[in-house]
Each structure stands twice: as C-alpha cells, then as structure tokens.
Image (cartoon, rainbow, N blue to C red):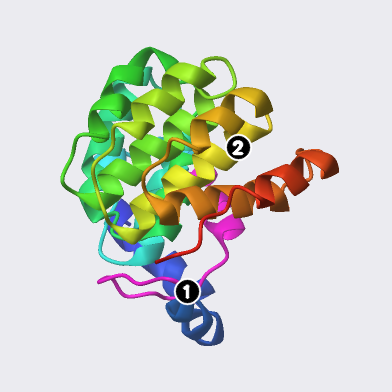
Amino acid sequence: MKIKELVKDYIDKIQDPQKAEFDKKLIDTQYEIKGTKTRLLNDFAKSLVRIGADFYELPLDNYEEILLAGCFIGRVKASPQEKVKMFQKVLPCIDNWGACDAIVARLKGLESERKFFENLLKSEEPFYVRAGIVWLMKYQLKQDMQNVINLIRKVKNDHFYVKMAIAWCYAEAFALDYKYMYDFIQKEPDIFIRNKALQKACESYRVKKEDKQALKMLRVKNK
C-alpha cells in the first residue's frame, strides 16, 4: 500500500465526528477537519518513520494530514537543514493557530536554522509570521531574551493571531526578566498587544503575586 493510501486509511479509521464538530468551533481553517487525537497522529508518525516512509509522499489534504506531517518532522532523523526543507513544504498549508502551534512545538534542535525563522517575521502571510514568533519563543527566548523580544517588536502585521503570538511571547518573557519587561511593555504602542501580554503574564504561575499587582496597573483602557 502506498504511503498516501496508508495515511488516509488510518485517519479515516480513527476519525471522530463528535470531536471534529468540537474542533471546528476552535479552529478556523479551509481544510476539512476529521477529528482525531494528536497523540494518535504522533504515534502513527513514529511508525511511518520506523518503516522508512518518504516525507514527500505524505498527503496534505486535510487538517489531520497537515498535523501528521508536522509530527513526522519531529520524529524523523534528519539534518536541521532537511527538516527546514520539510517544514517549508507544510508551511503553505498552515492557515490556523492550532496547526501552527502544534507543528512548531515539534521543531526542536533547529537552532542552526534560526535565520530562517527570523525571516518568517517579515512575511505578509500571518501564519508564517506566527510560526516564526512561536519558534523563537519556544527555542530562543530563554537564552537570548532581549534580542528575541526586540526582533518581535519589529513585526508589522495586524492579524489577530500574529498579535496574540506577540503578546504570548511577551508574557513568557516576564517570567524570565520581569524588570526588563516591566519597562519594555510600557513602550508597546499597540494597546491590544500590551493589555493581552499583561493579562497573560498575570495568569502565569511563574510571575510573583506582588509583581502581578503592579502589572495590572499598567493596563490601558481602550479608547
């Protein structure tokens, strides 16, 4: 059986119409949602890697197949350059926050390819930008916080899910260097990003209770 047929048969077997209806309320995508557990897709990706499946034969016709491709990249043994090449094939299919965040979460060990992800920040495609932000946040923020934050500040994209990703990254940074971010966030000109970052920081268990009280005072009322 060809890889494409193997994938389609497996997803049809594990699909859950009830979960699909639930996922459709959370995920806005042009692709069909079958309704499957990501854990099962990850396990299946592992088995595909084990049998030596060719990544470039994987279908990308629905939401689950796109997630599966991301899981495959995370599981396969390949050079960082080859993994980025694989990701570039999947990237045009990422049109929602769910696929973006789930796939980027599997792009570990690609530090040598940081420039590729930085360049995504300049794209006009919102989920290319979000992918770049989320990758930098997950894999570079801890060791290079100030540079990452200042790179992300330069992003000029008003898409809702880009701005949410920026706010998410800023909130994560508060847990790493509260003093720096306390000053930084007051210079953020976008009220939505500023307030959302403060909200998320206040929801974080890694930010001290007394610091959260100070952050609440920095929220700006929308005009």
Q: Position of residue 12 (x, y in %)?
A: 43, 74
Could one spot residue 6 in this view of the protein?
A: no
Residue 172: numbered disc: 2
Mark 1: amino acid: Leu
Q: Residue under label 1, please give it.
A: 26
Could you say which is closer to the camera, residue 170 or residue 221?
Answer: 221
Q: Which residues are magenta?
A: 26-48
Q: Is residue 106 above or below residue 143?
A: below
Q: Residue at x 35, y 72 (%)?
A: 28
Q: Is residue 191 left or right of residue 180?
A: left
Q: Quadrant of the N terminus?
A: bottom left
Q: Position of residue 223 (x, y in %)?
A: 39, 66
Task: For label 1, count other residues whose C-alpha is less than 10 Å away and answer few (under 14), some (14-19) or many (20+).
Answer: few
Q: Is residue 217 above or below residue 21?
A: above
Task: For label 2, count other residues whose C-alpha is less than 10 Å away and answer few (under 14), some (14-19) or many (20+).
Answer: many
SS of the residue at dot 2? helix
Q: Residue at x 75, y 46 (%)?
A: 212
Q: Nearer the viewer, mark 1 or mark 2?
A: 2
> How far separated are the C-alphas under marks 1 and 2?
23 Å
Residue furthest left in the image: 124
Q: Which of the two discs, 1 and 2, labels the residue nearer the N terminus?
A: 1
SS of the residue at dot 1? helix
User: Is 33 inside the magenta-drawn segment?
Assistant: yes
Q: Position of residue 32 (x, y in %)?
A: 32, 75
